Amino acid sequence: MLDFRKPVVDDKQWVDECLKYVNSFNCEYTFGNIFVWSTAYRTKICRYKDFLMCRWGKDSEFMYSLPIGKGDFKDAVNQIILDAESNGVTPVIYGVTSNYKKLLDEHFDGKFNYKFDEGYNDYIYSTEKMANLSGKKYHSKRNHITNFKKNNPDWTFEILNENNIPECIDLHTKWINNHADDEDYSFEFEAVLTAFEHYDKLGFTGGLIRVQGEVIAFTFGERHSDELFVTHFEKAPADVQGAYTIINQEFTKNCLMDFEFVNREEDLGLEGLRKAKQSYNPEIFLEKCVAVYVG
């Protein structure tokens, strides 16, 4: 049986080595994402030979990641199947993109059924387009930024670091207090606090916007590969017009231009979030599915 345990910061080195072999732009496959959400999702990780495996949930609700690394992929998947069966649950693998679906079908012909849910697909954008916001498609975005700058002429952008992180926590605390009745937002806040606690060790990159010296928006994420950056968190007050738009653009312009793409993760089926993500016209809408082993 596989030896799953909760991830710790010191796992980053070997996990990152495995993730070099990931053949997908899937937002889940960064160490920071795995680590900061480990409490909320009850994440455990396992090193099997030269593969990383993740397991989420507990008891009868186990769900697994694909094995990511180098070596015998079929053997690694079989180990997942055995681990699930030894725990009395159906083997279920989450976040399967089309290339990995082909690989599963190649090695396990007819033994997996696939379930799709658009709410868990990733929105992936061109950093150049996000930075420039050129053309008719982005007319409303440019208007939001123009209005923000007009209403807040003393705004500034800053790189996120250990000195200004406490101000970001204060901003998020105010934000979470307005959503105290939503358990999902509480889980998110816990993940953000974990991220800030280990910010440098996790290799995060972020930025913030100030108005009259006060932090009114922040965002951060991490490198996925040479081509892709993943933005994990972005917070701003809803009543400040253009705050989300300007932190998005300024962070992209100042921090992400070495990447071709930025993955801004899923919409989780939330209508407001879906509308916001679609409004930026993604280059790639990365379809992910759940593979259910039927034997």
Image: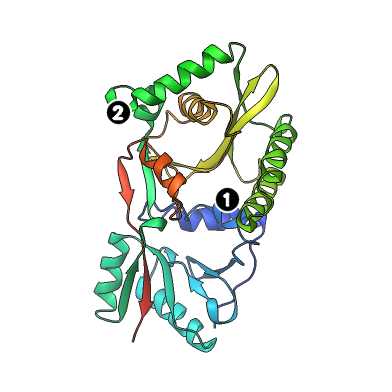
Estimate the x, y position of residue 262 in percent, counting from the top left: 41, 39
Please give the label number shown on residue 32.
Answer: 1
- Characterize the local packing of mark 1: few (<14), some (14-19) or many (20 or more) Cα atoms within 10 angstroms: many
Between residues 225 and 114, which one lies in front from this camera angle?
114
Which of 206/209 is in front? Answer: 209
**Residue 2 spot, x, y in % from top left:** 55, 78
Q: Taking 270 as reference, is 234 above or below it?
A: above
- The label shown at residue 260 is none
Report whether residue 198 is seen. no
In the image, what residue occupies the spot 62% across and 67% down?
A: 42
The image quarter containing residue 105 is bottom left
Colour option used:
rainbow
Answer with mark 1 or mark 2, whichever residue precedes in sequence.
Answer: 1
Which quadrant holds the N terminus?
bottom right
- The answer to whether one can see residue 234 in this image is yes
Whether residues under marks 1 and 2 lie with C-beta atoms below 8 angstroms apart, the answer is: no
In the rendering, at what x and y percent does residue 224 appear?
Answer: 46, 46
Q: Percent x, y for residue 60? A: 55, 82
Quadrant into which the C terminus falls: bottom left
> Can you tell which mark lies on residue 137?
2
The kind of residue tagged 2 is Lys
What's the distance in space between the residues labelled 1 and 2, CA to CA? 32 Å
Q: Amino acid at mark 1?
A: Gly
